[in-house]
């Protein structure tokens, strides 16, 4: 089966000019095939490394991790991929299932399909119905390819004649304990860059990316910047998978592919004998003594060549080919505009749904009850929607006509909250609606009117369309005749030309907001290429600090979908004072910034300083007054346990700039806790406010200290925003306005009465 890569995007067009030539070979035309790397051996070798993989249904099955097969929805499936450098030698499906006690044994079966091939059959017996059952089914590895679908289909019968497929007695539950066990064998691959980023990043591998980066010794700033750009590029490709970049000095990882940075003068010992290079070079080779693990060599005459080579990868990976490629030149053209990250919804114009799709046929569904169609809306964290009346969405959809005259509808949900529904008339197979997404929705009854915040837009939002059909099934008639209607599946499509309009809204946000940093990389991601970001590193970073740098930049790349081509690094605090940029600090905070009034948490060696606020809400959604944010006490705690912290505060040099500091107490375990928190989506969700303390027990976030605002609002909008958050002052202003209006009316009436009296006096 052809192995689709589907990974490469045309970043080169409009953003950079690059020339790349393959070393020691003539120029070749661009390859037109998308086949995966060809294994050096067509058959598996007996001494090849093996790996066991367990795919639990809780991870790969549709939410909530278990399946219920019914008469109207008799099938469900899981999907899994196999890396290009591995082959499956053994596959066993462990099924935990409970069939309905109403099902007729023998006539009812559970069919298992692997890539549309019947791979197994479970015939229900009288002893199985109504009880929890376990079974093992061996799958033929020859039917497993690079991308696979394992489909379970129920053939359920509760009567011999006149059955109603919608009868609630037809069901079979697949338990969460079900799993698929795979044994995979490594394949030796050719050294060929034409399939890059494979095997270092494989689109079929749904596991988080772990890619070690190796240096000969502590890297200088230029090497650090080159590695940071490459990590952000790999992060943009890893996307939702997650990513981690462990840093090693002068050693290779155990049984893992790796990236190695080396100049002619500074090289790790294991590639000392490699010939010197004359220009920026990218090469893929086997690790010493291991044909199954690859090294991506980033080579150059000096550190600047390493930076050029990495920029060549980030902007022209489509031109890489052969075992070795050289980067002749990279010229960055026009800088990116603010808020134009590829993964974000555009805020300068209307955005079509075609721009938001992540895979083919995402906007289509079919079946007796078609599955929901979902879209992800990633918004800039500082989009100011507080006083907005709503967001316009132009919705165009097509559907097969329902049989029923009434009852079929399209329901639109945002973040699992119902917004609107539309009927599906049987005579029409297309519809167009101008939907107004409310930011506040009123609920009314006969007694009172209650206004509640119905929709809360965040950084990551899920827009879901549910097509619900009212179907009629006939299993028998009153006069005893048996009439059976064969159910026909429905087809629904949300048109790609549908659009959502977020243009015209201002950018304004209360800071510090570590949630905006954890979930969207803000404020650094304001420019997708990090053009206005400065990273402050220690002068002699150890491997843990370097790992933190690469993980932080990799996370931002995954959130924006674009590499940090213009990020700047420094080791001099005085240099940071002279730049108009947001600052990312890794390691320690300079002595002149260690002021308790500005910084809510400090970590220094084995002592942790924490300013505890008077009132601490459970999340950043809960309102908190300025008095509550003031520090109640400053506590010094001596401890031998590992401690890390993420701190946000206003830049001391520019009121519109922010500082995010990633700190640890110096122990390797503390840095490990910090990196685990950045790479774990659940722990990232627990980071908010102005300080996040990370310990063995988890993440505790605080909102304390002074707050400030980043962005621009006209004075009248700032006034309304301030009044909206202070009901007492809003009521006071309303009272003053009423009194002024009453005074004006009183004076006007007095003037009128005086004129009338004057007229009477004249008479």
Image (cartoon, rainbow, N blue to C red):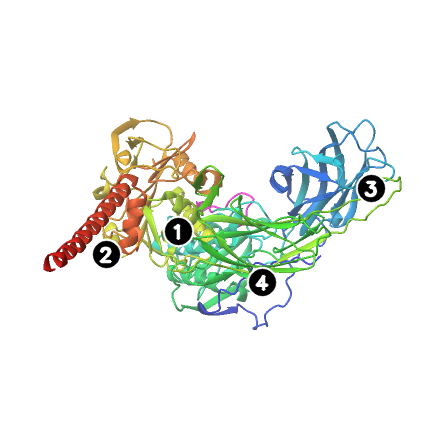
**271 is higher (above) or lower (below) than 62:** below
Question: Which mark lies nearer to you, 1 or 3?
Answer: 3
Judge left or right: residue 631 versus residue 268: left
Comparing 394 with 733, the one in front is 733
Q: Locate residue 67: give its quadrant.
A: top right
Q: Position of residue 47 (x, y in %)?
A: 67, 44
Considering every residue shown, the one lying at the far front of the view is 763
Q: Residue at x 22, y 47 (%)?
A: 742
Q: In this figure, which residue is indicated by the disc labeled 1? A: 385
Comparing 119 with 427, the one in front is 427
Give the structural element (helix, strand or loop) at label 4: helix
Q: In this figure, which residue is indicated by the disc labeled 3? A: 475
| Pointer 4 with pointer 3, Cβ within 8 A | no
CA gap, disc 1 and disc 3:
53 Å
Comparing 176 with 206, the one in front is 176
Classify mark 4: residues with Cα within 10 Å, few (<14), some (14-19) or many (20+): many
Give the structural element (helix, strand or loop) at label 1: loop
CA gap, disc 4 and disc 1:
46 Å
CA gap, disc 4 and disc 2:
43 Å
CA gap, disc 3 and disc 2:
80 Å
Per the picture, the main secondary structure of the magenta-coloured stretch is: loop
Q: Position of residue 664 (x, y in %)?
A: 35, 37
Instruction: Looking at the image, tell me whether mark 4 or mark 1 is earlier in sequence order.
Output: 4
Q: In this figure, which residue is indicated by the disc labeled 4? A: 194
Q: In this figure, which residue is indicated by the disc labeled 2? A: 578
Question: Which mark lies nearer to you, 3 or 2?
Answer: 3
Q: Is residue 224 visible?
A: no
């Amino acid at each position: 089966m052809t192995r689709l890569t589907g990974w490469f995007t045309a970043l080169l067009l409009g953003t950079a000019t690059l020339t790349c030539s393959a070393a020691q070979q003539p120029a070749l035309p661009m390859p037109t095939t998308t086949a995966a790397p060809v294994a050096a051996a067509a058959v598996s070798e007996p001494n090849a490394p093996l790996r066991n993989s367990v795919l639990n249904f809780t991870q790969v099955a549709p939410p909530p991790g278990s399946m219920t097969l019914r008469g109207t929805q008799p099938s469900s499936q899981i999907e899994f991929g196999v890396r290009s450098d591995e082959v499956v030698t053994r596959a066993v499906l462990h099924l935990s299932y409970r069939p309905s006690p109403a099902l007729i044994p023998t006539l009812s079966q559970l069919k298992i399909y692997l890539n549309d091939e019947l791979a197994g059959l479970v015939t229900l017996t009288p002893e199985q119905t109504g009880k929890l059952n376990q079974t093992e089914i061996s799958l033929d590895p020859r039917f497993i390819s690079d991308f696979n679908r394992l489909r379970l289909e129920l053939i359920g019968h509760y009567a011999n004649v006149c059955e109603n497929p919608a009868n609630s007695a037809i069901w079979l539950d697949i338990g969460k304990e079900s799993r698929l066990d795979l044994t995979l064998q490594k394949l030796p691959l050719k050294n060929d860059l034409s399939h890059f980023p494979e095997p270092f990043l494989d689109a079929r591998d749904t596991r988080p990316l772990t890619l070690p980066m190796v240096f000969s010794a502590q890297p200088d700033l230029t090497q650090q910047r080159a590695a940071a750009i490459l990590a952000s590029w790999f992060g943009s490709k890893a996307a939702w998978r997650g990513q981690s970049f462990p840093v090693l000095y002068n050693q290779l990882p155990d049984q893992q592919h790796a990236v190695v940075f080396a100049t002619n003068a500074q090289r790790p010992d294991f590639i000392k004998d490699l010939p010197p290079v004359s220009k920026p070079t990218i090469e893929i080779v086997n690790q010493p003594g291991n044909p199954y693990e690859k090294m991506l060599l980033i080579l150059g005459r000096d550190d600047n060549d390493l930076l050029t080579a990495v920029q060549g990868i980030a902007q022209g990976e489509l031109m890489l080919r052969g075992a070795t490629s050289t980067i002749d030149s990279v010229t960055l053209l026009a800088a990116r505009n603010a808020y134009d990250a590829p993964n974000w919804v555009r805020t300068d114009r209307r955005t079509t749904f075609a721009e938001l799709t992540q895979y083919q046929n995402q906007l289509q569904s079919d079946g007796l009850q078609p599955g929901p169609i979902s879209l992800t809306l990633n918004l800039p964290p500082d989009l100011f929607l507080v006083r907005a009346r709503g967001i316009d969405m132009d919705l165009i959809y097509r559907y097969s006509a329902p049989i029923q005259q009434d009852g079929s509808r399209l329901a639109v949900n945002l973040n699992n909250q119902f917004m609107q529904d539309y009927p599906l008339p049987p005579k029409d197979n297309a519809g167009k609606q101008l939907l107004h997404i409310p930011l506040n929705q009123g609920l009314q009854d006969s007694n009172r009117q209650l206004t509640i915040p119905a929709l809360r837009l965040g950084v990551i939002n899920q827009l879901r369309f549910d097509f619900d059909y009212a179907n009629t099934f006939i299993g028998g008639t009153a006069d005893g005749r048996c009439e059976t209607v064969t159910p026909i599946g429905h087809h629904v499509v949300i048109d790609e030309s549908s659009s959502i309009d977020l243009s015209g809204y201002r950018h304004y946000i209360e800071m510090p907001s570590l949630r905006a940093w954890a979930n969207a990389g803000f404020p650094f991601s304001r420019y997708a290429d990090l053009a206005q970001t400065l990273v402050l590193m220690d002068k002699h970073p150890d491997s843990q600090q370097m790992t933190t740098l690469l993980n932080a930049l990799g996370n931002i790349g995954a959130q924006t979908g674009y590499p940090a081509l213009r990020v700047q690094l420094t080791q001099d605090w005085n240099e940071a004072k002279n730049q108009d940029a947001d600052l990312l600090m890794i390691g320690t905070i300079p002595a002149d910034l260690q002021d308790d009034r500005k910084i809510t948490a400090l970590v220094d060696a084995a002592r942790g300083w924490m300013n505890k606020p008077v009132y601490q809400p459970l999340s950043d959604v809960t309102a908190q007054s300025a008095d509550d944010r003031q520090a109640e006490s400053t506590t010094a705690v001596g401890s031998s346990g590992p401690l890390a912290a993420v701190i946000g505060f206003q830049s001391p040099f520019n009121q519109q700039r922010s500082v995010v500091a990633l700190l640890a107490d110096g122990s390797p375990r503390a840095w490990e806790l910090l990196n685990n928190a950045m790479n774990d989506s659940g722990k990232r969700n627990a980071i908010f406010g102005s300080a996040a303390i990370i310990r063995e027990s988890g993440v505790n976030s605080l909102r304390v200290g002074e707050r400030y605002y980043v962005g621009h609002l006209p004075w009248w909008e700032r006034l309304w925003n301030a009044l909206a958050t202070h009901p007492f002052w809003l009521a006071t202003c309303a009272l003053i306005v009423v009194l002024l209006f009453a005074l004006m009316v009183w004076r006007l009436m007095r003037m009128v009465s005086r004129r009338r009296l004057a007229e009477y006096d004249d008479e």
